[in-house]
Amino acid sequence: MGSKERIQRLKEDTRANILDAALQIVKEEGWQALSMRKIADKIEYTAPIIYEYFLNKEGILLELTRQGYIILAKDIRAARDENKTPESQLEAMWIAYWDFAFQHKELYQLMYGVDMNCCELKKSMPEAELSDDLMYDVIAKLITIEKPAEDFVCRKYYTFWSIIHGLISINLVNKGRDAEMNQRILKDAIRGIIKYIND
């Protein structure tokens, strides 16, 4: 490996360490505790070095948000690919969405603003649409209306999302039911929407 490649690799490693440290701080202390100073202390660098990689804390939040959307899309795609029918694909995809929210709680909070302010700049982030597009495609396959309007498919997506995100949010702020009851509610909601998808 040449010196240029070694320097580039070191930069990539440092950038990844900054993001890992930020996420670790959040897991230990919550989003409100995150600061550039704490990140620098965690990785034993000076604060100015952090600013060489990220302009400000918002830059770190945006990158973590982007990474969250990439992980979520990968999980949803895998769930879709493991199932054959659109009904079973959609159920598996929303369950993968649910699982992501609890396996990556801090990222989900950041991505969707649960119990905190989320990044406003994510609206221009193409990764934010990856999982939405996967869901839209499968929802469109379930609709039997010939050439449904785009807003019809969109409405069905948001019906799913609002119910499932709402259930996740209730649980993330510790006001939900036990795991078994949550799974029953989740599956009832998904299957109910699928059943009436053409209404």
Image (cartoon, rainbow, N blue to C red):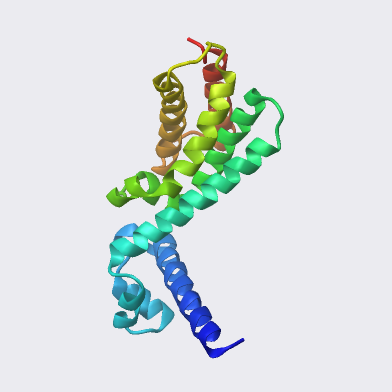
Q: How many marks?
A: 0
Q: Quarter-wise, where is residue 162 in the image?
A: top left
Q: Is residue 104 visible?
A: no
Left or right side of 32 for 64: right
Left or right side of 125 for 74: right
Q: Residue furthest bottom?
A: 3
Does 15 sit above or below residue 131? below
Q: Position of residue 104 (x, y in %)?
A: 50, 52
Q: Quarter-wise, where is residue 94 in the image?
A: top right
Please give the name of the residue rendered at 52% of the width and 15% of the height, measured from the top-left corner. Answer: 197
Please give the name of the residue rendered at 60% of the width and 29% of the height, measured from the top-left corner. Answer: 91
Front-lying residue, 97 or 81: 81
Q: Position of residue 38 (x, y in %)?
A: 33, 74
Front-lying residue, 12 or 107: 12
Q: Position of residue 159 (x, y in %)?
A: 43, 24
Does 192 sit above or below residue 184? above
Q: Is residue 68 visible?
A: yes
Q: Position of residue 154 (x, y in %)?
A: 42, 25
Please give the name of the residue rendered at 45% of the width and 49% of the height, measured from the top-left corner. Answer: 127
